[in-house]
């Protein structure tokens, strides 16, 4: 599998929507073919429309607060020794996480299509919170589908969703987590697609939703590229870009501008959720060699049993607690452009403690998985290496979990 240069990876699929000939596609019921085709054609035009792009850029700057900070973590770097550690603080964005980029673009598309209702799924609550914010901003009525288990463990974001005027639809089937929320959201759209636009919260699902989300979050790497050039006059020679990977939206956005650089110059490292240390359950299909399967309208590596049934997952991080992954990341793995590993719940908690001890950062449990890998490899590298972690969410939503596990107020 080869990656083409100077072409966004979201566009490097075949006529049937598959990356590398086998990842992605659009496995959808007949009833959804018409709205998916309409959305595909609409987005194809909008992403080339100068007025729409200007509107996107205006809201990214004035509403989201782009660009977010790019900072060196001096204290953490000195403590660990070895490579310099930097952070792209995407949690500075309005609402506290990268999900706001995708939510804002989907709200603009919904308005452009003349629809008044928008729905979405959420696990950690950030995708739902951001979509409820965007819906309120643009005068749309909003429903958020969320697993009952996640509603209990992500109360701060649920409170914010309701405060923004959106309805939370509890999902009590299956594992009552993100995977079930996505399924229920898609079922609702089947019956209401004439009046309702659906926002998929990550780079997963049928081809068009992968593309819209990737196009939206690519803003992160556009900013980072400009910030690197401003800081160093060019792109440094030894960079490791480390990002947590659940569905994979923040990682794709963080890497997008750098994918066609040689991996000897810029290494891409994705960190999945390894789950509790002594549990057989995890959410790491890429790094634990899951088999190819179909989930939520796309082919990707999926945690499944010998009969091909979707496995339950377990992670302290609701945003990474998903049995599948973006077809984009499956393609990057098979093309050997990105390396994927995992961090356990305990690794993430220890990383959170270390980062907050040495720096004025408060990363959520999702990017704490990425920080765990940075902390692991930094001391083994020479000082001319540079590690950049995408701190893609803040820990306000995790306050109850952190208090329970670490005794933090």
Image: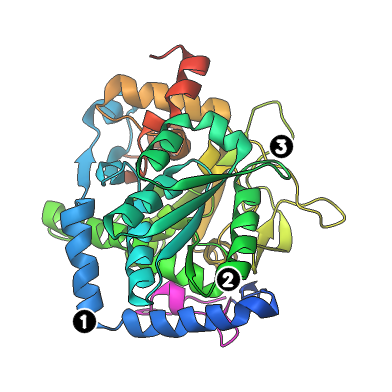
- Decide which of tag 1 and tag 3 comes sooner along the chain: 1
User: Would you call the spot at circle 1 few (<14 residues within 10 Å), some (14-19), or many (20 or more)?
Assistant: few
Query: On screen, 108 above or below 127?
Result: below
Visible residue check, residue 215: yes
User: Would you call the spot at circle 2 few (<14 residues within 10 Å), some (14-19), or many (20 or more)?
Assistant: many
Q: Which residue is mark 2?
A: 206
Tell me which segment is drawn in magenta: 1-19
Visible residue check, residue 258: no
8 in magenta: yes
Secondary structure mostly seen in magenta is loop
Quarter of the image for residue 15 reads bottom right
Q: Residue at x 29, y 60 (%)?
A: 138
Q: CA distance from mark 3 to mark 2?
A: 26 Å
Q: Which quadrant is home to the C terminus? A: top left
Of residue 366 and residue 264, the one placed in the foreground of this image is 366
Q: Which residue is mark 1?
A: 50
Query: On screen, 17 above or below 387?
Result: below
Q: CA distance from mark 1 to mark 3?
A: 47 Å
Q: Which residue is mark 3?
A: 281
* 137 with respect to 327 (left or right): left
| Residue 252 x/y as whole percent | 43, 60
């Amino acid at each position: 599998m080869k990656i083409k240069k100077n072409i966004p990876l979201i566009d490097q699929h075949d006529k049937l929507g598959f990356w590398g000939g086998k990842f992605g596609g659009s496995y959808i019921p007949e009833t959804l073919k018409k709205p998916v085709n309409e959305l595909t054609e609409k987005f194809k035009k909008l992403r080339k429309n100068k007025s729409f792009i200007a509107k996107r850029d205006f809201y990214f700057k004035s509403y989201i607060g782009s660009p977010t900070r790019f900072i060196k973590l001096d204290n953490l770097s000195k403590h660990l020794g070895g490579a310099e550690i930097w952070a792209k603080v995407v949690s500075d964005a309005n609402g506290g996480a990268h999900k706001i980029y995708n939510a804002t673009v989907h709200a603009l598309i919904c308005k452009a299509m003349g629809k008044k209702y928008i729905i979405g799924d959420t696990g950690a609550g950030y995708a739902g919170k951001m979509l409820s914010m965007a819906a309120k901003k643009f005068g749309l009525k909003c429903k958020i589908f969320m697993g009952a288990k996640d509603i209990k463990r992500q109360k701060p974001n649920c409170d914010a969703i309701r405060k923004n005027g959106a309805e939370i639809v509890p999902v009590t089937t299956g594992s009552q987590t993100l995977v079930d929320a996505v399924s229920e959201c898609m079922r609702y759209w089947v019956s209401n697609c004439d009046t309702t636009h659906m926002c998929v919260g990550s780079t997963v699902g049928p081809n068009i939703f992968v593309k819209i989300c990737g196009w939206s979050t690519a803003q992160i790497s556009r900013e980072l590229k400009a910030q690197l050039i401003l800081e160093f006059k060019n792109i440094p020679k030894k960079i490791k870009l480390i990002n947590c990977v659940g569905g994979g939206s923040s990682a794709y956005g963080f890497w997008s501008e750098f994918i066609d650089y040689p991996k000897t110059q810029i290494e891409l490292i994705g960190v999945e959720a390894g789950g509790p240390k002594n549990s057989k359950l995890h959410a790491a299909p890429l790094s634990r060699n899951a088999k190819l399967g179909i989930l939520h309208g796309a082919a990707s590596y999926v945690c499944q049993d010998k009969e091909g049934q979707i496995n339950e997952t377990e992670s302290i991080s609701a945003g990474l607690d998903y049995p599948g992954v973006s077809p984009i990341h499956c393609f990057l793995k098979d093309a050997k452009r990105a390396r994927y590993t995992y961090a356990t719940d305990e690794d993430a908690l220890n990383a959170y403690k270390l980062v907050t001890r040495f720096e004025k950062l408060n990363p959520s449990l999702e990017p704490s998985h990425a920080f765990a890998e940075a902390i692991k490899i930094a001391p083994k590298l020479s000082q001319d290496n540079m590690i950049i972690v995408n701190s893609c969410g803040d820990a306000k939503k995790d306050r109850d979990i952190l208090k329970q596990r670490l005794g933090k107020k």
